[in-house]
Image (cartoon, grey):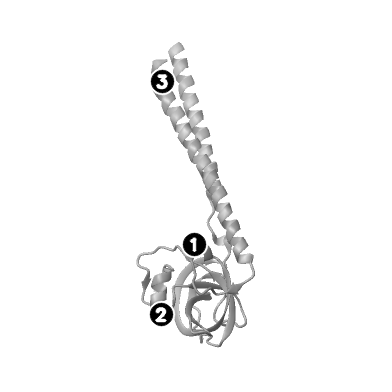
Amino acid sequence: MRTLLFPLVIGLGGIAVLLWLGFWQVERLAWKEGVISDIQDRVAQDPVPLPEIVDPASDNYLTVIMQGAATGAEIRFLDSGTAAGTGHHIISAFELTDGRRVMLDQGLLPLYAEEGEALTDEVTVQGNLVWPDDTADPLNVGDEWYARDVDAMAQALETEPVFVVLSAATAYDARLTPLPVDTRNIKNDHLEYAITWFLLAVVWLSMTTFYIVRSRRQKVA
């Protein structure tokens, strides 16, 4: 029995760790589903005028409406795997009728698309405040950006650090395909991870049982 103690401890310990990881992923799944549900509720709300002071914690995904015009100053954020394919998000400096300047993601310019004139007419737009958590090093090379750092982009475009993703407008930039905030793009693979850990626990249990049974049979023989 003493010779089986060590593999038994290793087997039960491994199973316990794998089960813990599986249940942790189940908890993460519930948390992520709550986050997605909250975003969907915020996006579905009626739009409100852009607040004078925005707060990243309480105003994330807030639906806002504003009137003004793009200035023509733009940032191109490279993105792939969007609903409109691969291309550049055109993030414009948008000047409101009251003189405020914020950033507006107007949509996707397809990769290698022919250049056209930017829409700079006065429009009314509806969209959602967001604070993206992209990471990249470097942030940008020239006028092509690889991460949406709100503060850095605001400095480049000389706007407030306020980022709005367009969902509807009275007129659209003909070059672009709008990409409203969509929870389908939020990664949620916790269920797959949970299943993986639970299956590994089953495999570990099977291997431990097989080893112990074989060892006992060899002893008897």
Q: Which residue is mark 2?
A: 158
| Mark 2 or mark 1, earlier in chain | 1
Q: Nearer the viewer, mark 2 or mark 1?
A: 1
- Quarter of the figure with residue 185: bottom right
| Mark 3 or mark 2, earlier in chain | 3
Q: Position of residue 49 (x, y in %)?
A: 58, 75
Which residue occupies 35% across, 65% down?
Answer: 137
Q: Disc 3 versus disc 2: distance between alpha carbons?
A: 68 Å
Residue type, mark 2 in image = Glu
| Mark 1 or mark 3, earlier in chain | 3
Q: Quarter holding the C terminus?
A: top left
State the mark number for residue 5: 3
At label 2, counting other C-alpha atoms closer than 10 Å, the crowd grade (few under 14, some 14-19, many 20 or more) is some
Side of 216 where 30 appears, left or right: right
Q: Which residue is mark 1?
A: 57
Q: Secondary structure at mark 3?
A: helix
